[in-house]
Amino acid sequence: MAKATILSVDDDEDLQFVVKEYLESDGYKVLRAHSLKEFEMWSAQGNNIDIVLLDLVLREAEGLSLIAIIKEKIKAPIIIVSGKTDTTEKIVCLEMGADDYITKPFEMRELSARIKAVLRRGKGAESNGTGGSSSPTHDGEFRGRIYFGNWYLDCGQYQLYDLEDKSADLTSGEFKLLETLALSPKKVVTRERLFEITRDSSNFDAYDRVIDIQIARIRKKIGDDAKNPDVLKTVRGVGYMFCAATEKR
């Protein structure tokens, strides 16, 4: 049985061939779409796609709008695979809901590591179902609910809801970041530690803005004013602190 099903959406057929050969030798099932039309064909067939590898330049469409098109069709996390090294584009892609961004050319080992990291961040939703219990799982991780303000984190479903059960539509990375902070209320968590937990990487760069971008996205989704936050406080030069009162259930 394959580890996961990966859909590569890219018009570079030579690169797709190499990616497919490498990832399938690593235990994954890889589907290929060379155009938006072929992507729609795969999504319409109801395939259980776990991750999308998306190039932002296709024959009939290109640009950041592709992220929204993909997310509308399937809920799988998206890793952008781009030949552009522009930092601004990377930031915008993450702000629009992409889960990661890797620049061409890249080593296959790095791609595999990023895929594993994204899958790892989302595995709780798959393995714990609806997760109504407040009991820890066998590995000691809390899988109940954490209430704060007008919100609650459902750690079994890897999602944030308001008190009317409407989802805030967090990405897996955003959820893991908020969960980490909520499980250590009133304590400062360093950016290095947050990067390690949410990106699953030891190659932390002090100038990498991924954590800051995700915090900004979370604040926007929960209505937390960055200038005067009630939930996520910035500790300048160190990291972030969850400052709202919490209740576990």
Image (cartoon, grey):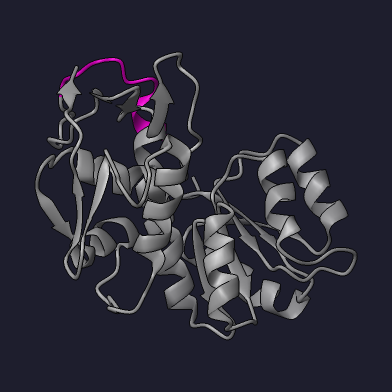
Q: Give the percent coordinates (x, y) of residue 31.
A: 68, 56
In the foreground, 167 or 36? 167
Query: Which residue is at the far front?
Result: 228
Task: Name which quarter of the figure residue 246 lies in.
Answer: top left
Question: In the figure, 247 relative to 60: above or below?
Answer: above
Determine the residue positioned at 58% across, 64% down. 92
In the foreground, 187 or 198? 187
Q: Is residue 21 visible?
A: no
Question: In the figure, 33 relative to 185: above or below?
Answer: below
Q: In the rendered structure, which segment of residues is drawn in magenta?
A: 126-135
By secondary structure, the bulk of the magenta-drawn segment is best described as loop
Query: Is 177 a magenta residue?
Result: no
Q: Give the percent coordinates (x, y) of residue 142.
A: 18, 31
Tell whether 225 sits left or right of 146: right
Q: Give the percent coordinates (x, y) of residue 214.
A: 41, 55
Tell whether 56 sits left or right of 185: right
Q: Is residue 177 visible?
A: yes
Tell whether 226 sits left or right of 77: left
Quarter occupied by the C terminus: top left
Determine the residue positioned at 35% across, 61% down. 211
In the foreground, 39 or 194? 194
Determine the residue positioned at 27% across, 46% down. 232
Question: In the figure, 126 relative to 10: above or below?
Answer: above
Query: Is 131 a magenta residue?
Result: yes
